[in-house]
Amino acid sequence: MIKIKNLSKVYTKGRNQVTALESITLDIHKGDIYGIIGLSGAGKSSLIRCINRLEEPTSGDIWINGVNLVTLKSAELRNARKKMGMIFQNFNLLHSKTVFENIAFPLRLLKTSEKTITEKVKKLLDLVELSDKAHVYPSQLSGGQKQRVGIARALANEPDVLLCDEATSALDPKTTKQILDLLKNINKELGLTIVVITHEMEVIKEICSHVAILEGGYIVEEGHTIDIFSKPGNAVTKHFVEQMQHLPEQYLEGKVLNLSFTEGSAGTPIISRLTKVFDIDVNILSGKIEYIQEKPIGKLTVQMHVDCHKLLDIITYFEENHVKVEVLKQ
Amino acid sequence: MNHWIELLTPSLLETLYMVFASVFFTILFGLPLGIILVVTDPNHILPNTRLNGVLSYIINITRSLPFIILMIFIFPFTRLVVGTTIGTTAAIVPLIIATTPFFARIVETSIKEVDWGVVEASISMGATPFQIIMKVLIPESMSSLILGVTITIINVLGYSAMAGTVGAGGLGDLAIRYGYHRFQTDVMIATIILLIILVQIIQSTGNKIAQIINKK
């Protein structure tokens, strides 16, 4: 669906050169919700804007449905863009036009007949649950409603891809959730491929089937969201995944272990069994279970007073039960 | 009272004719000029540094000339266009030439106010530069443009008084001939009051229209 090959973007200002993206290679399949996460300045915005060439890549190729976007002339590029919807952090709606006209805008660019426009816009208004706001101006809408209009507008041309540039970053958590649910729905119902860039891990957890972690213009890790979450291999990834809480020193006595449960093990009462098998006491210092697209991932920090031999046995026991162990203190 | 109406009406009509005819052409020439100034900027939708530089330069030159000097300076051109350099219609030529660059700058400022994000959104939807100008830049800045037109009308009203000195007629001419040369202070005051009323009407109408259009 979308194949990005060796994409680089260098900004030149006078004599200064800043490399925003360095040999990015990505493969996004049809129907994926592909998340790209990174801190500010990681290059994620440049990356998504290169996909529809709002920014010109310095080098590399972007294949969409077998067409290399980089080679397209302006008229062909405009046609290609019509098959790519985009939504923005600041919504970017036309203030001078009603909700209806905003959604109709991409259709009017194509000189669609009035009858088709009315039909299509009505359907889209239904989809984003704004039928009652058709003749209202954007300034009278809340942030979440504005983004719904943005989504409806992006869908008007029945695109193959939806690009979301920090689409929920300006919204509160509750509205974010609603917008994400809407995106998830659209993905399911229309089979639309969605590319999301964000700095919020919640967004990735909530909707993304795949994730790439971007750092300093490079992709440092990439794969299925659930895999990345359960076994983060990279320091930056860990930063996003764990958002480490620091345990106060005085609690760090005895042996302290970090446990990660995945789908295979999150359902079993593993700690309870551990205490029986090894006849030890286990103290839980912190813990949580998260659901990533309805799949549970558990994180637990436990403390126990055992000697080193027993600790090795315990680690083996955990690993046999598909629990990933990290020793914090021995 | 009749005497006043007889005296003021022709001058008022001359003024209105001069002002609205010049403003009509000023918008006709100045709006595209202002838009070209914005879109040919290196960071806009139709970058063309050369054209941008040349236009900006010409506008600055025209704007540096005081109106009364410009009017005399372009007499040959005025004669070429309307066949004469005196009279109300002749005054319209220098008025247009003086006001068009002024209005172009105002248009430039208004169009630049349009949020770049909205322009980018239209680019991402595959809009052509012409569609962006017609369907995004102009409608989005309409309220601000109307205020710009209002300022321009009032500006032309001021210039048109000066045009009176080359026989263009109008309220300015009346005030000078009667009020100054013939020491008829009452005529002077009457013209001033009329001008004040005119400016008030133009400004408040402009504000009202801009307010209705503004959906921000």
Image (cartoon, coloured by chain):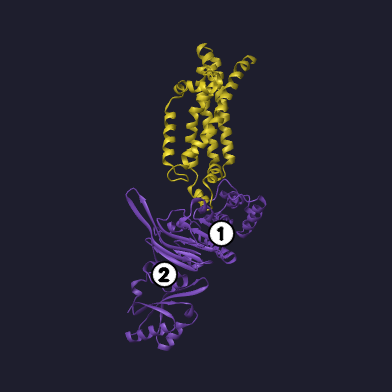
Chain colours: A purple, B yellow
- Which structural element holds mark 1? loop
* Dot placed on the residue nearer the N-terminal end, 2 or 1: 1
- Which structural element holds mark 2? helix
Name the spot of residue A313 as percent of width and height, x first: 37, 86
Residue position marked by numbered label 1 in the rendering: A159
Position of A291 with respect to A220 (left or right) is right
Q: Nearer the viewer, residue B18 or A139?
A: B18
Name the spot of residue B52 as percent of width and height, x first: 43, 38
Name the spot of residue A199 as percent of width and height, x first: 44, 61
Q: Nearer the viewer, mark 2 or mark 1?
A: 1
Corner quadrant of residue A304: bottom left
Q: Nearer the viewer, residue A75 or A210?
A: A75
- Above or below, comparing residue A316 to residue B44 in the picture: below
- Above or below, comparing residue A272 to residue B46 in the picture: below
Q: Nearer the viewer, residue A119 or A238?
A: A119
Q: The residue under label 2 is which amino acid type? A: Glu
Q: Residue furthest top?
A: B182
**Alpha carbon separation for disc pair 2 and 1:** 35 Å
Q: Residue furthest right?
A: A115
Q: Residues within 10 Å of mark 2 (few under 14, many from 20)?
A: few
Tell me what residue is drawn at x 60 percent, y 65 percent.
A189
Position of A212 with respect to B89 (left or right) is left
Residue position marked by numbered label 2 in the rendering: A242
